Image: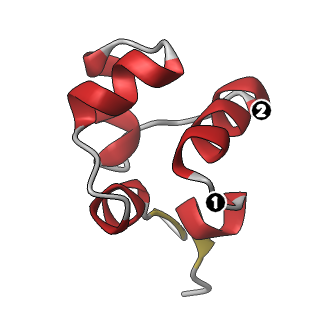
Amino acid sequence: MPIIVNLDVMMAKRKMSLNELSEKVGLTLANLSILKTGKAKAIRFSTLEAICKVLDCQPADILEFVNK
């Protein structure tokens, strides 16, 4: 898939665990884990906005397009 999810990288930069992010964003661990591993087929803008607010980052810090 040409879209790479760098959520784990941003979480590491902010020294935040998946549990902590889950609590602050209001998503289940299972849904965040699916997103983090790149297995998600879609993401709501509201979810992306909440993650960016908590991690203090831009969507491009989390999602990357790689043309293969």
List x then y, in percent, for residue 28.
35, 12
List x then y, in percent, for residue 68.
54, 87
Instruction: Looking at the image, tell me whether mark 2 or mark 1 is earlier in sequence order.
Output: 2
Marking on residue 38 = none
Q: Secondary structure at mark 2?
A: helix
What is the basis of the colouring in this image?
A: secondary structure
Q: Are marks 2 and 1 in contact (CB under 8 Å)?
A: no
Please give the name of the residue rendered at 65% of the width and 31% of the height, measured from the top-left corner.
Answer: 50
According to the image, label 1 marks what residue?
57
Q: Is residue 21 left or right of residue 66?
A: left
2 or 5, which lies in front? Answer: 5
Q: Is residue 38 left or right of residue 15?
A: right
Residue 44 occupies which quadrant of the picture? top right
List x then y, in percent, for residue 55.
53, 49
Please give the name of the residue rendered at 35% of the width and 68% of the height, measured from the top-left corner.
Answer: 13
According to the image, label 2 marks what residue?
45
Q: Is residue 9 left or right of residue 47?
A: left
Q: CA distance from mark 2 to mark 1?
A: 14 Å
Residue 60 occupies which quadrant of the picture? bottom right
List x then y, in percent, for residue 56.
62, 54
Please give the name of the residue rendered at 64% of the width and 27% of the height, measured from the top-left corner.
Answer: 47
17 or 5, which lies in front? Answer: 17
Mark 1 neighbour density, 10 Å: few (under 14) some (14–19) many (20 or more): some
Mark 2 neighbour density, 10 Å: few (under 14) some (14–19) many (20 or more): few
Q: Is residue 53 left or right of residue 62?
A: right
Q: Secondary structure at mark 1?
A: loop
Count of numbered tags: 2
Q: Nearer the viewer, mark 2 or mark 1?
A: 1
Going by the numbered disc 2, the residue's amino acid type is Phe
